[in-house]
Image: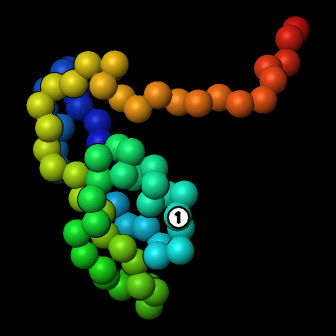
């Protein structure tokens, strides 16, 4: 996804996701991407998602990760 150097503003970013890839579409939405267009890539239809440029964000603004399962102990 988008990155920032030294706390500066992020640039507008985009991603291509296959129309049947529901997990990636859901993840893109969690990170603020919205569907902008439908395009063709290597002969296959793709959904284009965009996220506008944003100002500096704190780490607490990121979606929380959910970890399931057990961790192995050493």
Residue 2 image-quadrant placement: top left
Residue at the location (23% across, 31% down)? 4
Residue 13 position (above or below residue 20): above
Q: Is residue 35 left or right of residue 6?
A: right
Quarter in which the C terminus is drawn: top right
Q: Is residue 73 left or right of residue 13?
A: right
Could you tell me residue 39's position as x and y percent? 31, 82
Residue at the location (35% across, 43% down)? 31
Residue 13 appears in the rendering: no
Q: Is residue 23 left or right of residue 69?
A: left
Q: Residues within 10 Å of mark 1 (few under 14, many from 20)?
A: few
Residue 66 position (above or below residue 18): above
Residue 53 appears in the rendering: yes
Could you tell me residue 45's position as x and y percent? 41, 85
Could you tell me residue 13's position as x and y percent? 24, 52
Q: Secondary structure at mark 1?
A: helix
Residue at the location (36% across, 29% down)? 62
Could you tell me residue 68's position as x and y percent? 71, 30
Residue at the location (41% across, 32% down)? 63
Quarter in which the N terminus is drawn: top left
Residue 6 position (above or below residue 30): above
Residue that badge 1 annotates = 22
């Amino acid at each position: 996804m988008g990155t920032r150097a030294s706390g500066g503003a992020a640039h507008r970013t985009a991603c291509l996701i296959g129309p049947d890839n529901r997990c990636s579409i859901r993840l893109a939405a969690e990170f603020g991407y919205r569907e902008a267009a439908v395009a063709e890539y290597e002969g296959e239809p793709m959904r284009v998602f965009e996220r506008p440029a944003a100002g500096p964000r704190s780490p607490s603004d990121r979606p929380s990760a959910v970890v399931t399962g057990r961790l192995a102990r050493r």
